[in-house]
Image: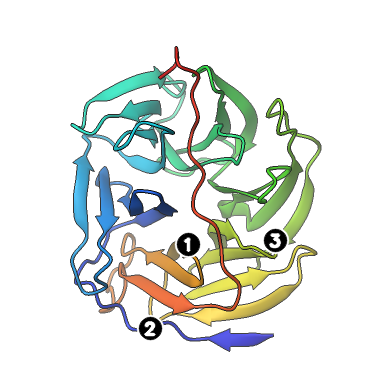
Amino acid sequence: MSDLLPEEPLRPDRLELGEGIRWTDEGMVLVDILAGRLLSAPDDPTAPLRELAHLPFPLGAVAPVADRPGTWIAAAGTGICLLAPDGKTTWLARPEDGAPVAMRMNDAAADPSGRFWAGSMAYDADEGAGSLYRVDHDGTVTRVLDGITVPNGPAFTADGTAMYLADSARGLVRRYPVDPATGELGAPETFLTVDDGSPDGMTVDAEGAVWIAVWGTGTVRRYLPDGRLDRTLRLPARQPAGVCLREDVLHITTARVGLTAPGPHDGAVFTARVDVPGMSAAAYSPTPEAA
């Protein structure tokens, strides 16, 4: 087990709640959740982030829509929408409208089979108020899990047969079998528990190891498929929130929200070179009638 050190953040941006970072065929994208901003990261590591869309509600995460350049499927507000290049939103469903407590969408990702999965949570992180939703190819939105407090991830193995999902408030990451043909989940097992912080955004590398941003600890950790800690990346920012791999470079988002005295690097985007590469984010693949 070894420690890694990131490069100093070069971009000037400091995000309130930077998450949902993804490497896609259209470049690097990320969100500032509570501000409702979808951002792109230019290849020049010193260039400011560029705003692609600014929504009037929280934006948890996006995935590209296959064969529709500039169009995204988004976990946003109280549900799931399609976000067009001109910023227009088309809602597929708003399942958290009318919930007993105020709810918003949080992290989300597409799986290798082209479905989209998105978690919801209460604004005040009420115990067990959150859910996980699956968006099938025809645009149908189904609640597949409930009783989650703060869902983060999901992250999928390359073959799409396993999903990792964090319940951050409980310090827990579970691994679920997935049937790629149907999207049905099997019985979960506990992958790991974190005692010194909260597991947040995740990504799986080419060896099947899971990189996890651990909120509140200033660390990103790589866990082997059997749950053993392999290495730790230490950041000069207290709240790592999102991770992705662009080949052999790990990109990390952090947050300033909730800090009474943010440091100079809280909310920055960091990079670190790693030994094992990752893959680009999967796209949501709708059937023609759902697109």
Residue 81 position within the rendered picture, expressed as x and y whole percent measured from the top left: 37, 26
Residue that label 1 marks: 243
Residue that label 3 marks: 208
- The kind of residue on which mark 1 rests is Val
Q: CA distance from mark 3 to mark 1?
A: 15 Å
Asked whether, in this view, residue 87 is left or right of residue 75, the answer is left
Q: Residues within 10 Å of mark 1 (few under 14, many from 20)?
A: many
Asked whether, in this view, residue 275 is left or right of residue 244, the answer is right
Looking at the image, do the residues carrying marks 2 and 3 touch, with CB atoms under 8 Å apart?
A: no
Q: Quadrant of the N terminus?
A: bottom right
Q: Measured along the vertical axis of the image, is residue 134 above or below residue 193?
A: above
Residue lying at the far front in this picture: please name it. Answer: 67
Which of pointers 3 and 1 indicates the residue nearer the eye? Answer: 3
Residue at 52%, 65% (x, y): give it: 213
Looking at the image, do the residues carrying marks 3 and 1 touch, with CB atoms under 8 Å apart?
A: no
Residue closest to the eye, 258 or 37: 37
Residue that label 2 marks: 7
Residue closest to the eye, 169 or 54: 54
Q: Quadrant of the C terminus?
A: top left
Residue lying at the far top in this picture: please name it. Answer: 289
